[in-house]
Image (tube, coloured by chain):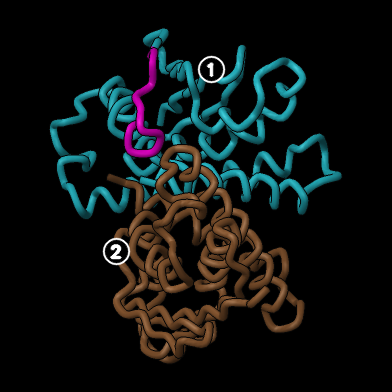
Chain colours: A cyan, B brown
Amino acid sequence: MADEALFQFLHSEIIQYVNSVESGESENGRCVSKLESMGFRVGQGLIESRHISDCRFTKDTPRFKDELDFMKFICKDFWTSVFKKQIDNLRTNHQGIYVLQDNKFRLLSQLSSGKQYLEHAPKFLAFTCGLVRGALSNLGVKSIVTAEVSVMPACKFQVMIQKM
Amino acid sequence: MADEALFQFLHSEIIQYVNSVESGESENGRCVSKLESMGFRVGQGLIESRHISDCRFTKDTPRFKDELDFMKFICKDFWTSVFKKQIDNLRTNHQGIYVLQDNKFRLLSQLSSGKQYLEHAPKFLAFTCGLVRGALSNLGVKSIVTAEVSVMPACKFQVMIQKM
């Protein structure tokens, strides 16, 4: 019922607090990196808690036969469990880069649309970048995740798989 | 699906971060107070978002005919929406003091049981104290909310209604 709202409000509070603490440092760099690492640990935890409750999702099962399968899991199951919707579009260059597009990203919905707010967008995306990186990491996939907003509240997450 | 886990992990991250930032100050006092005020704003927000989506819950409707009704709402609807269970026991002295007992408080379940962890409990309860105070505040009821743990993971929240 209030789940989504709870997550959104809590996420806002974290951004506000981390921003107030880390302010003054190199153009929000520390704030963004702090939020990203929080997301990373939460992403790891979410996958871990699913491992326990639902062993279908472990990396050892045939469910994931290749890299694309991991990404589909992130776009569908994982995204739905966190954001109550799937990723709207997944594209890949078939060389380890995946672009996940969410046309109505929930955590940007609090920001008014309009270009004047674009500068704040990185703070609102950092936690989720970490979340994806942490989830993939716990599935055994190392990655770099970045995000960009074109027109709010649409945004794109770019996942670069790091080959071992 | 991962809702509860998401909230729990996020809550842990906040405690850890706030604690690291506010450490060194008077025995966790600042950490606890910071977490409480985050909870307060989230509690306000949750009630506000319900006001919009579900006008049955506004304070102007006959649903709440007295103070006890507000407390029942907190113990049932509000608690369930946040913690996926109701408060196990509600007691009152009929003079504005209410004791809400949760026999298995979700946000303490990460802490191992045992007395040696009791000293950390206030940090794990502060956000929720604020959450209740914020929710009541947005329903027009001013209160002071404190909490205590006897045997983990059971705990009691004491709500003192402030008369206008």
Q: Residues within 10 Å of mark 1 (few under 14, many from 20)?
A: some
Q: Secondary structure at mark 1?
A: loop
Residue drawn at x 41%, y 73% is B108
The residue that label 2 is drawn on is B85
User: Which subunit holds the residue at mark 2?
Assistant: B
x, y percent for residue A4: 43, 41
Q: Quadrant of residue A135?
A: top left
As for residue A82 lying within the magenta part, the answer is yes
Residue type (three-letter) at the residue carrying disc 2: Lys
Residue A95, above or below A119: above
Side of A87 relative to B126 (left or right): left
Q: Nearer the viewer, residue A133 or A114?
A: A114
Q: In the picture, which quadrant includes the N terminus of chain A?
A: top left
Distance from disc 2 to disc 1, alpha carbons, whole Å, reads 35 Å
Residue A49, above or below A102: below
- The magenta stretch spans which residues? A80-90
Q: Nearer the viewer, residue B58 or A18?
A: B58
The residue that label 1 is drawn on is A154
Residue drawn at x 55%, y 66% is B127
Residue type (three-letter) at the residue carrying disc 1: Ala
